[in-house]
Amino acid sequence: MRASWSPVLVVLLPTFAAAGLVDQVERALLSITDCGTCHSALPTFKAVANLGDAAFVRTITAACIDLKIEDPDVCEGAIRTQGPILAHDLRHFSLWGQTATKFCEAVFGLCEPPAVNAYEVPFPKPAPENPKTFVSRGRPPFQMMHFSDAHIDRQYTVGAEASCTKPICCRDYEKRSKHVKMPALPFGSRNCDAPTPLADSMLEAAEKFGASAKFSIFTGDVIDHAVWDVSEDGVSQDMQTFSDQMAAILSAPLFPALGNHESAPTNSFPRNTTEHEITSEWVFNAQRAGWSQWIGEEATKQLRHHSGSYSTMAPNMSLRIISLNTQYWYKQNFWLYDSDTQQPDPNGILAFLVQELQAAEDAGERAYIIAHMPPGRGDVMRDQSSYFDQVIQRYKNTIAGQFYGHTHADEFAIGYSNYSEQTAVNAMSVAMIGPALTPMSGNPAFKIYDIDPDTFEIMDARTYRARFYDPHYQLEPTWELLYSARELYGPIVPSFSGKGPLNPAFWHDLTEVFHKNDTAFQTYIANKPRGREFIWSPCQGACKEGTLCEMRTLRSDVCGRMSGPIFHLPANGGTHGVLHMDSCDGSGIGHILRKIIQKASSSSFSTLELSELGGHLEQTVLAM
Ligand SMILES: *[C@@H]1O[C@H](CO)[C@@H](O)[C@H](O)[C@H]1NC(C)=O
Ligand SMILES: *[C@@H]1O[C@H](CO)[C@@H](O)[C@H](O)[C@H]1NC(C)=O
Ligand SMILES: *[C@@H]1O[C@H](CO)[C@@H](O)[C@H](O)[C@H]1NC(C)=O
Ligand SMILES: *[C@@H]1O[C@H](CO)[C@@H](O)[C@H](O)[C@H]1NC(C)=O
């Protein structure tokens, strides 16, 4: 008798145990409403993590499927790849320490991030007393092109379903389903990433408008948003394909930077102190294979030694391009929570930046910093953002420009020498951000700058875009100038003489105009997604306040909780700007866990708030 039912027990027991675990984890998740309850739930998660990665992944996956957070394959893929990183963290940090608070903030968005830990970045030399002055000789500017956030989906299938239940569509998920409601179109669809021909179309247009460009920059994110379905081989291949595509079309050299999507699992960049079988070596190898043709031998070597960062000279110019892997400062890189020890400079990225800026200063060169993550947004670790600010302050005379992507918006942000006194005089650096190619976030776009060849200051910034809703777009996108910053903003900035560069003081004075002139401000808002057709409501109230704050910081602790999690925004939080500050990892495990606790707290929201929130979430989640 016994022998006949014991195998059944053997099969059933783990299932019962697992069901109990799932139940406990679900209850723990649903109990999380604020920072304190997040801390209180951590012992449950830690206990599951202590059973091993497999048990952790199984349990969270079961909860995700059970609560219908995403399609089962999305739950399964996202948690299988990213879950082990969270489990590793939970086994390594103590429950009530600073890392636990940072973890609760990054994963659930529910804690105020701890104040910046005091740290003085070491500099090899003090700032020179009589810094070199860079004077324009009035020579004609040269052109530099800026591409970002391509997010090309190499599995994009024309005719596949463009309206699906997954975070991105236009893939042949159903294997030739006969009942396509909305077929994927040749040059992209709104719920999908960029098809290959759209990237070709943009690069060909750029080659036309920027025929005389001396070089281009790409500020990261080649890979699509199907984060539940990424692999090392797939990401390496897609990086190489994009490099080949750029090289085939662009005649001038390209200087790329690494995005958070250039990894598998997405956002995964272990620190050199992390003991785990996952490493980023393969990413750095993929960079080397694709980028060496443009960046030269020395810089190619640096990619490995400096975790995906490099420095090289712009062709025939006294301009140093410093490309940083900013993912070690990204809150959604969950490896950053795997120890209670606070590391001021994970993998030495800041030290590398200082070394290269010092070399530039010593040689009397100027420098551009190019990277994926704008340092002043809510999704950047406060510590590293603040230390980065120290570096910018120290080398403000050398740094002639900063260029970023990640937000998918066409925007700018100013750094100040004194954040308590944000004035034109104190404006010391300006960052140009975005725009993106992927049609998910607006009209596909890129930028061309006019640059003074002596000072390397920006004389003009022009945004080119293809209108997605143009009736001919799907036959052949038409690329055209959307605006020139000099022509559009120059005349409304009273201090601007019409001559001279668009320097940090100019951009500061423009923010003064935006404070006073709502028409001008709303124009800026419409330009962020490269067209008014992507604006559903005017940006007012908290949205406006947040956007104005964001423009005036390169430090992530300045806009405070305004740059916090989306579900803490007031219901009238608007649809732009503020929401882009949300830390966002596409549709990865963080997104899934936030959706679970959002589900729990939804009973306390009115239906209207909830539906607004849903819309916001969708936009934000797909935004980065
Ligand atoms: C740099 O200058 C040299 C000599 O003037 C010229 O032959 C070369 O084509 C230039 N390279 C680039 C990339 O402009
Ligand atoms: C990690 O990288 C930093 C910066 O390059 C270096 O100083 C440190 O020794 C490295 N640590 C380990 C354990 O490799
Ligand atoms: C920064 O500005 C504040 C407010 O005006 C002022 O009190 C402070 O002295 C300034 N700090 C420095 C270092 O100049
Ligand atoms: C406000 O800005 C718009 C441009 O966006 C400009 O046409 C208008 O003259 C400005 N209004 C004032 C009062 O300066």
Image (cartoon, rainbow, N blue to C red):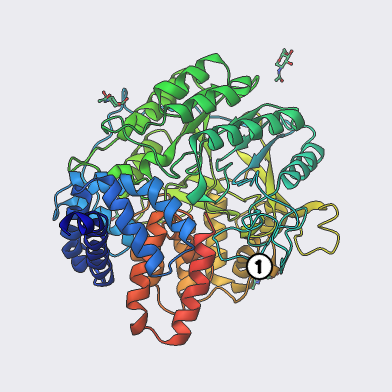
Question: Is residue 219 visible to us here?
Answer: yes
- The quadrant where ligand 4 appears is bottom right
- Image location of residue 137, percent across then percent down: 67, 29
| Residue at the farthest front position | 1
- Image location of residue 415, percent across then percent down: 44, 48
Residue drawn at x 48%, y 57% is 74
Closest to the observer, 509 or 238: 238
- Image location of residue 287, percent across then percent down: 53, 28
Q: Residues within 10 Å of mark 1 (few under 14, many from 20)?
A: some
- Image location of residue 526, percent across then percent down: 65, 65
Closest to the observer, 200 or 579: 200
The yes-or-no answer for disc 1 within 8 Å of ligand 4 is no
User: Does residue 207 lie above or below 530 as drawn?
Assistant: above
The total number of labels drawn is: 1
Q: Give the residue at mark 1.
A: 534
Residue drawn at x 43%, y 54% is 76
Q: Is residue 340 left or right of residue 621?
A: left
Amino acid carrying label 1: it is Phe
Quarter of the rendering occupied by the N terminus: bottom left
User: Does residue 241 lie above or below 90 as drawn?
Assistant: above
Residue drawn at x 63%, y 45% is 150
Q: Is residue 9 left or right of residue 321?
A: left
Question: Is residue 456 visible to us here?
Answer: no
Residue drawn at x 74%, y 40% is 203
Q: Determine whether the residue tagged by mark 1 lies in a helix, strand or loop.
A: helix
